[in-house]
Image (tube, grey):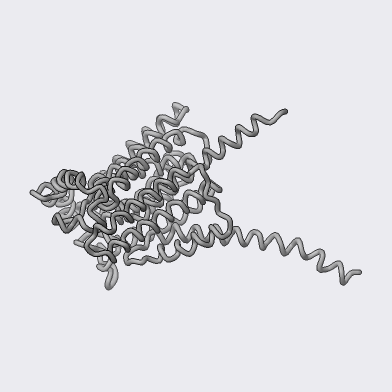
Amino acid sequence: MSTLAAPLVRIPHLRVPRALTVRGLGNGSLWLAAFLSGFVIREPAPYELYMALLSVVWLGCGLKLRREFGPLIICMMLYIAGGIASIPMAQVQGDAMMYIAVSGFLAITAIFYAAILADDPDRFRIIQSGYTFSAVLVSAIGIAGYFNLFPGADYFTLYERARGTFQDPNVFGPFLVLPTLLLIQTLLRGPVFRHLHLLVPISILLLGIFLSFSRGAWVVLFAGVMIIYFLALVTEQSSRRRARLLFLGLAGVVAVLAFLAAALSIDTVDQMFHQRAKLVQDYDGARLGRFARYSLGFQMVMDYPLGLGPLEFNKHFPEDEHNVYLKGFTTYGWLGGTVYIFLAIWTFCSLVPLLFKSRPWTGFAQCLFAVFTAHLILSVIIDTDHWRHMYMFYGLAWGLIGADKLDRKRMRRANSRPT
């Protein structure tokens, strides 16, 4: 009897660790996805190859596409459909098809993140951790590259600007803003002395954003900080804690001024800052500069319902669109351009109610809203069409929107049950 009973006793102890391991592997794979989003210096990037595999595996394991984030799925499908219809308009069919294929893949990543968060909104902690760790490391690499701290470090710069592990400083800088806001929000909401260690990663991220010399990144950071600070003030009910927030805001302004003074004491930094700090650069206000192309481009697409075709705009003008809303019409036709604007507005409006609800992920939603809104503004002057983290923002936003809808459905069912 004893020899037969022994295995029966051990079976429960084998099952529990196995279940925990599967959950741990799933969380670990999600953390790695967020971490790899910061490494896109070459295409196809490790992030893209990994996400292609991860999406298939998670869907195969039962990840659900819910109606609660159906608007994201439908809009992304229509957006890509507009791009496919525009391919015949392109002169080089192969490049056009590849461009739209990348857009389609990025749309899938947005849907993946939406499904992940709608299924379990607490997964925001895993994504936040992976993203923040990646951003701090990437920022440190960019800083090392700018100051040439090791042989070959200048590989991580472009045009004397830090680019980290990105192709362009204008993508590198904005990528760092969300984790910066999340860390700043922790300082604003929690005990300051308990979180003093966060000043180290915050400083690394701020220096990386500054050394990108991306005016867009600076605008995104400023707008994002203002939004989360405003939300912290209006949602705080304690007058004592509101006074604390005012003091922290003043201290933050003093710290930023000291930070700028220290950075600008370096001659090369000072020269680049004054060059990049101009509101209008020469290439912005030229005869066929950035601003002139906006007007001419929108006039031009009025005659092309299917668009000009992927990668065709710079064959008519000196450079690309540098405006994602214009690019929606030139590359994805009237259908894609209209749908993208509609999706942006719908996402913004759907996120607003989440900012004032008491949820474990409200703080994350507020930071996401702030950086997403700032990116929508930035998209007026820069092309964010193939920014990996922009599609991630859409997915995370609709994941939280879907989770909130599911929570409300559960509450209605619970309230409707007879007592």
Count of numbered circles on the image:
0
x, y percent for residue 95: 28, 64
Query: Which one is nearer the viewer's eye here, 135 or 34?
Result: 34
For the point 15% across and 55% down, which residue is it? 316
Query: Which one is nearer the viewer's eye here, 233 or 347?
Result: 347
Q: Is residue 255 visible?
A: no
In the rendered image, the quadrant that contains the C terminus is top right
For the point 53% across and 62% down, which residue is it? 57
Left or right: 195 in relation to 407: left
For the point 48% across and 41% down, which residue is it? 401
- Image quadrant where residue 50 sits: bottom left
In the rendered image, the quadrant that contains the N terminus is bottom right
Left or right: 13 in relation to 127: right
x, y percent for residue 390: 36, 51
x, y percent for residue 16: 70, 59
x, y percent for residue 264: 20, 52
Q: Is residue 357 visible?
A: yes
Position of residue 42 relative to residue 271, above or below, is below
- Image quadrant where residue 86 sits: bottom left
Residue that lies at the very extreme toward the left in this rendered image? 287
Query: Which one is nearer the viewer's eye here, 402 or 362?
Result: 402
Left or right: 163 in relation to 23: left
